[in-house]
């Protein structure tokens, strides 16, 4: 590619033809790509712009910039709309699920990727199976199960299923990463006087940090954005997470569009910041998780 | 030996918590759901055994079949909408220039946004009175195109498919990009010297060479269609008059709106069976095609 781009006097006719083709192609392609990218981003841009408008502005000129920037929409959504408490619930549930997923996932990944035992194949197969199951088909039995053990309408009713469904991805990402290290790792640590727990906490966990980071970002996005589980398992107003509050909020405050737009922006901004910071690992990780799923 | 006993003890204790959480919240519910499907149960009081009645009722309900058909519309829209766009973009966006990376990021952006927010935004886009789509059409002099995008049963499945396609092109783009990067560069050079034009190159070289990746993408489209629940639940709730019902919204409405837990469980089990059949069936079909 590079040799063609720099060009040379000795280039063959076909190469020259390819270069002109590419050169003229970029003239048409790049504007088309730019328009495509802007069209993709537009619904989100429209959301952010609308979140600063007054209701009259929202109806009167839906495509224009706000005639007056209403920053108060955000404080109103946070306070009146109860988005503040939903935000806090989302943080609590996401952080606890993440901590549990990381600990259990890394421990399991260490065992299945670096230790030998008879039922290894069975354990691995069980976790693969989990990735094939359509999540929504478990809503009814999970609801009944949690009702029976009395954890419906608590943080645990979200944290435990989130962790359970994220474990397969976490295990596979961390296990794939851990298999790359030499086999003698545990033996050397053993000679230094470590038990298996010592090896896990002092050697494996520090080694696995990059893989755990990928798992964290993906897990956070999934937990933060989940709607189906929150819809079915949470009924208590005080425990509602952001996506759930938004879906109800937009009904209750149906006519106060500026408030709803600001609330939606509050929900979206953290994920967009994380996306902009960790783009590459999110793209790669999501694809790895998706392909395996 | 004490050493192996210690190892065994560590493995057992180490696996126990993860396996417990996983079995209790993922595997056992599936088995239970098949079992509950045999009962008539309202969530409270005694459950009475029905045998296969719930399953038979679902299979005889025209709404169940409409929901399945709607799921298939989402599958077809995803396969025909997402994959060709993603494939074309992956051909164009191979270089790592700043502009190309910007376009890739933009295409991927909707993936990190909550589906509830996406559903609400598109609800505003399609709104019959204040929706920006109708306002746009009006201002372009296309007033005759104005309609109730989510209310008209003739078109609303296509309306709800648009955001499904819009939001999910990103991962396929990245999958195809990495597959194309694995094609040996000599093949590309050879094709160029032979004067292969872009279109031909795509058709004759890229598609056959990444066929395995395309197969994976098709399976992902199929399983993804079963996940379209959130988006459509927020936009239409399956209505009006169950015209946008999906298997998952049908299951939800029967269970949590009219409290038929037994029936909802039977539908859940059918969803698992159907998704397994679709995924395995598509695999078999494509394998056959590949051998011929």
Image (cartoon, grey):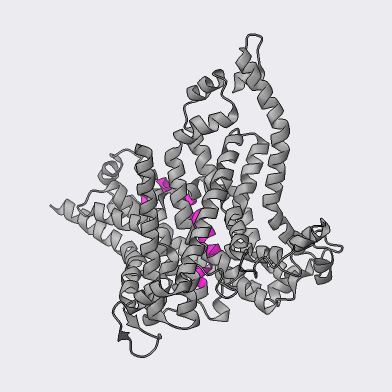
Would residue B183 be visible to someone looking at this image? yes
Q: Residue at x 42, y 40 (%)?
A: B212
Give how far across and how far down residue A273 sits, in percent: 63, 54
Q: Position of residue B95 (x, y in %)?
A: 60, 32
Q: Outermost residue, left direction?
A: B1
Query: Residue B246 vs residue A121: left or right?
Result: right
Question: Between residues B214 and B43, which one lies in front from this camera angle?
Answer: B214
Q: Residue furthest right?
A: A67
- Overall secondary structure of the magenta stretch? helix
Is residue B73 inside the magenta stretch?
Answer: no
A144 sits left or right of A46 in the view: left
Q: Specify the quadrant of the image occupied by residue B150.
A: bottom right
Q: Which residues are magenta?
A: A202-230
Describe residue A126's horizontal placement relative to residue A217 as left or right.
left
Q: Is residue A146 visible?
A: no
Give the quadrant of residue A24. Answer: top right
Specify the quadrant that holds the N terminus of chain A: top right
* Quadrant in which residue A133 is drawn: bottom left
| Percent of width and height locating residue A36 | 68, 45
Relative horizontal placement of residue B22, taking residue A242 as reference (left or right): left
Nearer to me, A202 or B281:
B281
Q: Residue furthest bottom?
A: B45
Residue at 45 percent of width and 67 percent of height: A136
Number of numbered tags placed on the structure image: 0
Q: Position of residue B251 (x, y in %)?
A: 45, 73
Q: State the residue in front, A87 or A254.
A: A254
Question: Where B244 sits versus A216, above or below?
Answer: below
- Look at the picture and state if A63 lies above or below A140: above
């Amino acid at each position: 590619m590079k040799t063609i781009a720099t060009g040379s006097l000795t280039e063959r006719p076909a190469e020259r033809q390819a270069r002109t083709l590419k050169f003229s192609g970029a003239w048409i392609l790049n504007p088309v790509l730019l328009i495509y990218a802007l069209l993709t981003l537009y619904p989100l841009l429209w959301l952010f712009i609308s979140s600063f408008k007054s209701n009259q502005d929202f109806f009167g000129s839906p495509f224009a910039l706000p005639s007056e920037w209403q920053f108060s929409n955000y404080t109103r959504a946070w306070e009146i709309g109860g988005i503040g408490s939903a935000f806090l619930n989302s943080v609590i549930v996401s952080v606890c699920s993440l901590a549990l997923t990381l600990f259990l996932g890394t421990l399991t990944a260490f065992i299945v990727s670096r230790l030998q035992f008879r039922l290894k194949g069975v354990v691995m197969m069980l976790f693969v199976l989990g990735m094939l199951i359509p999540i929504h088909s478990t809503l009814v039995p999970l609801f009944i199960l949690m009702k029976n053990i009395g954890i419906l309408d608590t943080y645990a009713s979200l944290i435990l299923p989130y962790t359970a469904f994220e474990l397969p991805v976490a295990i596979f990402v961390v296990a794939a990463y851990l298999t790359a290290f030499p086999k003698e790792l545990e033996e050397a640590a053993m000679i230094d006087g470590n038990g298996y727990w010592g090896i896990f906490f002092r050697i494996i966990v520090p080694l696995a940090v990059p893989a755990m980071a990928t798992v964290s970002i993906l897990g956070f996005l999934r937990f933060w954005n989940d709607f189906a589980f929150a819809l079915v398992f949470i009924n208590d107003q005080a425990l509602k997470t952001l996506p759930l509050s938004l879906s109800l909020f937009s009904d209750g405050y149906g006519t106060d569009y500026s408030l709803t737009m600001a609330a939606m922006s509050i929900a979206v901004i953290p994920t967009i910041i994380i996306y902009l910071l960790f783009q590459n690992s999110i793209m790669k990780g999501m694809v790895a998780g998706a392909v395996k799923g | 030996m004490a050493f192996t006993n210690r190892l065994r003890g560590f493995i057992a204790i180490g696996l126990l918590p993860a396996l417990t959480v996983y079995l209790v919240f993922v595997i056992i519910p599936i088995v239970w759901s098949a079992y509950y499907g045999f009962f008539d149960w309202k969530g409270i009081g005694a459950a009475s055994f029905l045998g296969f009645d719930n399953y038979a009722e679902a299979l005889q309900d025209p709404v169940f079949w409409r929901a399945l058909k709607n799921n298939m519309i989402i599958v077809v829209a995803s396969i025909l909408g997402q994959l060709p766009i993603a494939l074309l973009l992956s051909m164009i966006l191979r270089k790592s220039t700043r502009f190309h990376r910007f376009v890739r990021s933009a295409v991927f952006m909707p993936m990190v946004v909550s589906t509830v927010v996406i559903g609400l935004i598109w609800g505003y886009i399609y709104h019959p009175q204040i929706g920006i789509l109708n306002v746009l059409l009006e201002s372009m002099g296309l007033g005759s195109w104005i309609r109730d995008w989510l209310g008209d049963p003739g078109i609303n499945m296509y309306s709800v498919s648009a955001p499904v396609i819009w939001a999910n092109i990103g991962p396929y783009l990245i999958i195809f990009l990495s597959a194309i990067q694995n094609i040996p560069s000599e093949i590309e050079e050879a094709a160029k010297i032979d004067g292969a034009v872009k279109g031909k190159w795509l058709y004759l070289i890229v598609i056959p060479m990444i066929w395995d990746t395309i197969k994976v993408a098709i399976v992902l489209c199929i399983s993804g269609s079963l996940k379209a629940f959130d988006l459509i639940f927020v936009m239409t709730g399956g209505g009006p008059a169950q015209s946008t019902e999906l298997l998952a919204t049908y299951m939800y409405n029967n269970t949590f709106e009219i409290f038929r837990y037994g029936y909802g469980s039977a539908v859940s089990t059918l969803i698992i069976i159907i998704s397994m059949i679709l995924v395995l069936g598509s695999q078999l079909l494509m394998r056959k095609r590949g051998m011929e």
